[in-house]
Image (cartoon, rainbow, N blue to C red):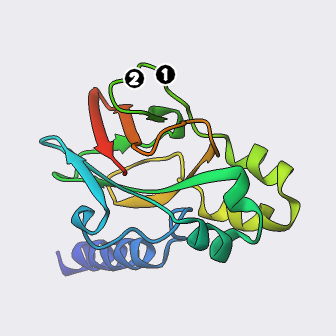
Amino acid sequence: MKAAILPLVALSGWLCAAERTSPETPGIPPKPSRAEYDATGFTESLAVGASLLTPAQVRALFGPGMDRVYMVVEVGCYSKDRTPFAVRQADFALRPPKSPARVTPEAPAEVARKNGPAAARVVAAALPEVRTTRAVAGYLFFPAGAVPSSAIELDYQGNGTWLTLPLR
C-alpha cells in the first residue's frame, strides 16, 4: 500500500513545483486588486480594472514619441471565482461617453512594426490573449486622437458580459 502512495505523493509535489516555476503569463504583473486601477467593473465571476496612462508614463515605458502616436491603457482582468475566462484585445474599445463610435486597440505586432525601438517592449507588455483562471494584465494601444473627447470610456464586451469603465 505504501509503495502505491509514494509515487502519487512524488507526482503531486512535482506538479505543485511545476505550477510555481512555470513561465509567467506574458504581459505585465497584475495589480494585487482590481480596485488599484482608476476604473473598475465586475460581474459575479469576472472583474476588469483599467487606467489611462499619462503621456509622461507612455514616454517612460516606451520611449519618446509614443505618446504622440498612441493612447495607452493598462488593463487587468481577474477571475472572481477561479472560473476560466478568455482575454482578447478585440473585446476592448475606447469611445466618448454616449457615443456609438468605438475604436479598437491596434495589434501589438502592428504597433511594434511602426515603432522599431520600442518593438520588444510593446510586444512583451501588451495585454496577453489567453484563456486562464489567473489574473492577467497588460497594455492596450489605441491610435492617439481617435477618440476626440476629454471624456473617454473603455468598453469591455467579452465572456458574455458588457462593462463600461470611465477613464477620464
Residue 64: % across, % down:
76, 70
Q: Classify mark 1: residues with Cα within 10 Å, few (<14), some (14-19) or many (20+).
A: few
- In the image, what residue occupies the spot 25% across and 72% down? 4
Tag 1 near tag 2, CB within 8 Å: yes
Q: Is residue 41 shown above or below 72?
A: above
Residue 25: % across, % down:
51, 63
Outermost residue, left direction? 44
**Disc on res. 99:** 2
- Along the line of sight, which residue is nearer the eye, 21 or 41? 41
* Quadrant placement of the N terminus: bottom left
The kind of residue on which mark 2 rests is Ser
Number of marks in picture: 2
- In the image, what residue occupies the spot 42% across and 19% down? 100
**Circle 2 SS class:** loop
Drawn side of residue 128 relative to residue 99, left or right: right
Drawn side of residue 22 relative to residue 105, left or right: left
Q: Is residue 94 shown above or below 42?
A: above
Residue 123: % across, % down:
69, 58
Drawn side of residue 53 relative to residue 86, left or right: right
- In the image, what residue occupies the spot 61% across and 36% down? 146
- Along the line of sight, which residue is nearer the eye, 116 or 128? 116
| Residue on which the image places disc 1 | 101
Residue 112: % across, % down:
79, 54
Residue 51, quarter of picture: bottom left
